[in-house]
Amino acid sequence: MYVEMKDIEKHYGDFKASDHVNFGIEKGKLVALLGPSGSGKTTILRMLAGLENPDSGDILINGKRINDIPAAKRDIGFVFQNYALFRYMTVFDNIAFGLEVQKVPKAQIKERVMELIQLTGLSGMEKRYPSQLSGGQRQRVAFARALAPNPQVLLLDEPFAAIDAKVRTELRNWLKDMIHKVGITSIFVTHDQDEAVEVADEIIITNHGRIEQTGTPMEIYKTPETPFVAQFIGKSTVVSHYEQLNGFDSVAGAAQAVIRPEFVRVSKSGRLEQYMSAAEEGTVEEVVFRGNHLELTINIKGISIKAERSLEKDPVSVGEKVQVLIYRLYIFDENRTYLMENSAMQENDVFYI
């Protein structure tokens, strides 16, 4: 592994920001630290950068322990959430700053800066100031400045947080392509699931200072290992008394379940063509327009679940009786998550993850 954290602990008074954190990242990977606010992801990033020191444990890059190496000598590039560009410096001078601090010869600085300006799509903007740039352009300058000294690792703290939604989507694709083109090992912090899934090669999910799960976006989404991940990932509805639903038996120790919208099919009354014995009658409680689909809240035997309905299908309205087919759900105990298929549709009830 190229970047490693081994049994890292970090406290702020009585608050445990990192609780025996362990993970490894392969060289050249783009990895997302994903979790809710206060989960410890930014603390991990700051300890890697040398802006915070762990209370115990080891941080290694390329096999070398870096705990005692000052931040300025760790050979790490850092892109801050608010860009942290120098307002009175041009694009060229902002990108060149780190190289000038290292006293790199001017001819080499010019060559490197112009290479990065072209790489990041900033050609023709060399003499502009940050105030003359859009949010996306400022982010590209911050990215180029961090890459200028050829760091061995790039860290990004919520790199898209200060950018409007449309530009954010464009920058996600740009950043992923750029990092793979450059080939630099990169770690970015985010609380946005869509961002992590779209951009990252791997995701590390944090919660209360612990690592809940590590894996590819597909692995994290399809096979959540812990109750927290099952509830945190996706547009999940947590329900009790899932055993009241057709096709699902109670499992000892597993008192709750998670149902995702893609596990549910909603049909207008009398229109369901198969699996009638597995379906439920529900009442539509809420209909919310989400742009490319309708989000429904449906009450089944006192249990409220979320579902989605295509705009191409006949609309449903609040108070309408509908037929609801729940294909599967995740159930969980204190430690593990299980995928349960609707037994009226499948022969096997439970698959361990």
Image: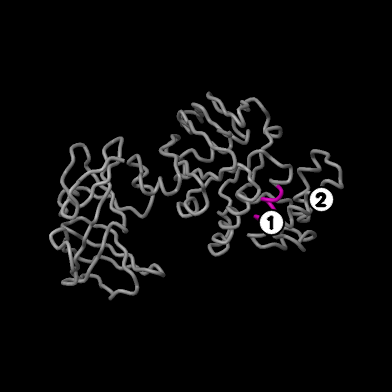
| Applied colour scheme | one colour
The foreground one among 340 and 92 is: 340
In this figure, which residue is indicated by the disc labeled 1? Answer: 120
Residue at image position (56%, 56%) is 172
Residue 327 figure quarter:
bottom left
Residue 183 has which mark?
A: none
Residue 111 has which mark?
A: 2
Residue 183 horizontal/vertical position (percent): 63, 45
Residue at image position (25%, 44%) is 331
Count of numbered tags: 2
Residue 60 vs 220, above or below: the answer is above
Which part of the image, by quadrant, shows the N terminus? top right
- Secondary structure state at the residue bearing disc 2: helix
Which part of the image, by quadrant, shows the C terminus? top left
Q: Does 171 sit left or right of 301 as displayed?
A: right
Tell me the amino acid under the disc marked 2: Glu
Residue 138 horizontal/vertical position (percent): 67, 57
| Residue 277 seen anywhere in this rendered image of the structure | yes
Tell me the amino acid under the disc marked 1: Thr
Q: Does 198 sit left or right of 262 as displayed?
A: right
Residue at image position (67%, 27%) is 69
Spatial CA span between label 2 and label 1: 14 Å
Magenta stretch: dominant SS?
helix
Residue 273 figure quarter:
bottom left
The foreground one among 281 and 223 is: 223
The range drawn in magenta is: 139-145
Q: Inspect the magenta stretch and tell me whether residue 143 lies in it.
A: yes
- Secondary structure state at the residue bearing disc 1: loop
Which residue extends farthest left? 277
Residue 177 horizontal/vertical position (percent): 60, 54
